[in-house]
Image (spheres, rainbow, N blue to C red):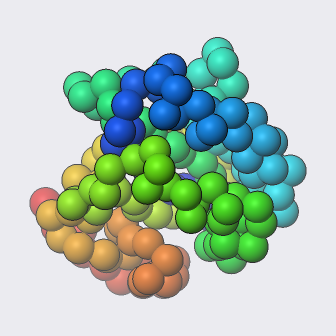
């Protein structure tokens, strides 16, 4: 099994606005870093090489990031132990603080590429039920055994 992740962010301005320029100018570098990181499997991207133009939500200022990793440790290492953390620390320059949960992790079979629709379902689930083995974050390090024992709430 691999670990899928989704995170969304609400931009403070359109992606082509000068306010967003430094974020946009770092996308290729950070995406290349992800793709070359240990444990990276896949990431969502459009024709431009990133996911900023992919509309998953009805609100144009919400952007999505999705990826698949071999496990939680490799995702954690990329997120917090590479230069990605520099961009993460600057998120308030480009994005609003989201009141609802904006990220979710879940286990996927090796070779499975999750869809944005699947990611939306996991976000909705974590918002409704909190962190469970079905949808969780770094705070709750649920295992595959936890998932097998979990009864999904509808």
In the rendered structure, the answer to whether residue 143 lies left or right of residue 148 reads right
- Residue 107 versus residue 145 in the image, above or below: above
- The foreground one among 107 and 100 is 100
- Residue 29 versus residue 68 in the image, above or below: above
Q: What residue is at 73 percent from the left and 46 percent from the top?
A: 30
In the rendered structure, the answer to whether residue 38 lies left or right of residue 105 reads right
Asked which quadrant contains residue 84, the reply is bottom right
Residue 83, percent from left and from top: 76, 61
Asked which quadrant contains residue 78, the reply is bottom right
In the rendered structure, the answer to whether residue 29 lies left or right of residue 9 reads right
- Residue 107 versus residue 40 in the image, above or below: below
Which quadrant: the C terminus? bottom left
Q: What residue is at 66 percent from the left and 18 percent from the top?
A: 48
Q: What residue is at 82 percent from the left and 58 percent from the top?
A: 37
Q: Is residue 30 visible?
A: yes
In the rendered structure, the answer to whether residue 40 lies left or right of residue 14 reads right
Tag count in the figure? Answer: 0
Q: What residue is at 36 percent from the left and 83 percent from the top?
A: 149
Residue 18, percent from left and from top: 52, 26
Residue 120, percent from left and from top: 32, 44
């Amino acid at each position: 099994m691999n670990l899928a992740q989704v995170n969304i962010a609400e931009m403070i301005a359109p992606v082509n606005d000068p306010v967003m320029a430094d974020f946009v100018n770092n996308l290729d570098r950070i995406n290349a870093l992800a793709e070359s990181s240990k444990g990276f499997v896949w990431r969502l991207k459009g024709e431009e090489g990133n996911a900023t133009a992919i509309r998953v939500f009805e609100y144009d200022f919400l952007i999505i990031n999705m990826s698949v990793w071999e496990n939680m440790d490799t995702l954690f290492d990329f997120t917090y132990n590479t230069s990605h953390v520099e961009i993460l620390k600057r998120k308030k320059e480009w994005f609003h603080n989201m009141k609802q949960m904006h990220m979710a992790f879940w286990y996927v079979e090796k070779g499975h590429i999750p869809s944005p629709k699947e990611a939306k379902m996991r976000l909705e689930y974590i918002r409704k039920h909190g962190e469970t083995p079905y949808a969780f974050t770094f705070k709750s390090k649920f295992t595959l055994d936890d998932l097998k024992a979990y009864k999904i709430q509808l």
